[in-house]
Image (cartoon, grey):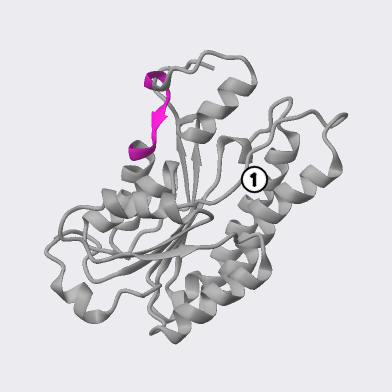
Amino acid sequence: MTSPDDKTLAASAVGGRFRGQVALVTGAGSGIGRAVATALAAEGAAVHLVGRTRGKLEATAQELAPGAPTPALWPKDLSVDANVEDLARALRDGGGRLDLLVLAAGELVQGTVAEMPVEVFDRLWASNVRSVYLLVQKLLPLITARQGQIVFINSSAGLGARPGGGQYGATKHALKALADALRAEVNAQGVRVLSVYPGRTATPRMERLYGDTGQSYRPELLLQASDVAATIAGALALPRTAEVTDLSVRPLAKSY
């Protein structure tokens, strides 16, 4: 596993708003994480791709624009503390540059409060909240040194929970609290913090959810991952006199 170096950044033929910046994207193997990684790379960023499965990260790397800086692949399960520690240490030892941190990894499980085992809730908490907290904590010095930006990919469930989604919604409400507090703590150091609340988005995870609930999956009626990525890129590229704190993005066709 290698990190993008200054020579690679300078040699990038891809122009754009993030040329010369280094980004780390979790959940980069598919869905919104993959879309954000490809969008940032298309505009010149050197990306660290983090996800559980190497094959999926390699597939993301293949989708990057020709001429984009060579990505670094980190196949790690971030719900394991030691993996977070290893990743943070490798980034620090590899030069310590980080301008953009996009937190798109997470897990979704549906079930009622009456029936969902607490062990499943524990797993959701570890994946959706605790791992994010620890990663932010470990990488914050690198972000602060660059006056960088942090993006929390939340969910519409982070603003209002639905029946059967109480456990998932609870983790996303916690993620909102974490982002809000962090923003107030680091704005004075020039760091911007953005929370994004997508509605239902056409991703492999959403397709599985529709299948589990017996609903007809019609991706053309949902948000596209590229829609969310474009919205995020626009917010990150704003002049430093402005900060977008919260973004809600919904499908135009309301199919649910």
In the image shown, does 221 or 65 lie closer to the viewer? 65
* Residue 252 drawn in magenta: no
Q: Quadrant of residue 227?
A: top left
Rendering coords of residue 171 (x, y %): 69, 47
Image-based side of 127 in relation to 27, left or right: right
Rendering coords of residue 144 (x, y %): 46, 77
Relative to residue 218, is residue 244 depicted above or below?
below
Q: Secondary structure at mark 1?
A: helix
Q: Quadrant of residue 109?
A: top right
Rendering coords of residue 77 (x, y %): 59, 59
Relative to residue 121, is residue 187 depicted above or below?
below
In the image shown, does 234 or 27 lie closer to the viewer? 27
Q: Is residue 245 visible?
A: yes
Quadrant of the image containing the N terminus? bottom left
Q: Tell me how many marks there are.
A: 1
Instruction: Please identify the residue farthest to the right as the structure is shown.
Output: 114
* Residue 225 drawn in magenta: yes
Image-based side of 86 in relation to 204, left or right: right
In the image shown, does 154 or 82 lie closer to the viewer? 82
Instruction: Please identify the residue farthest to the left as the structure is shown.
Output: 13
| Three-letter amino acid code at the position of disc 1 | Lys
Q: Residue at x 50, y 51 (%)?
A: 104
Instruction: Please identify the residue farthest to the front as the structure is shown.
Output: 55
Relative to residue 84, is residue 223 depicted above or below?
above
Rendering coords of residue 62 (x, y %): 28, 51
Q: Residue at x 42, y 24 (%)?
A: 222
Q: Residue at x 22, y 57 (%)?
A: 43
Residue receiving disc 1? 172
**Residue density around tag 1, few if under 14, some if 14–19, many if 20 or more, within 10 Å:** many
Residue numbers of the magenta segment: 220-226
Q: Residue at x 47, y 83 (%)?
A: 92
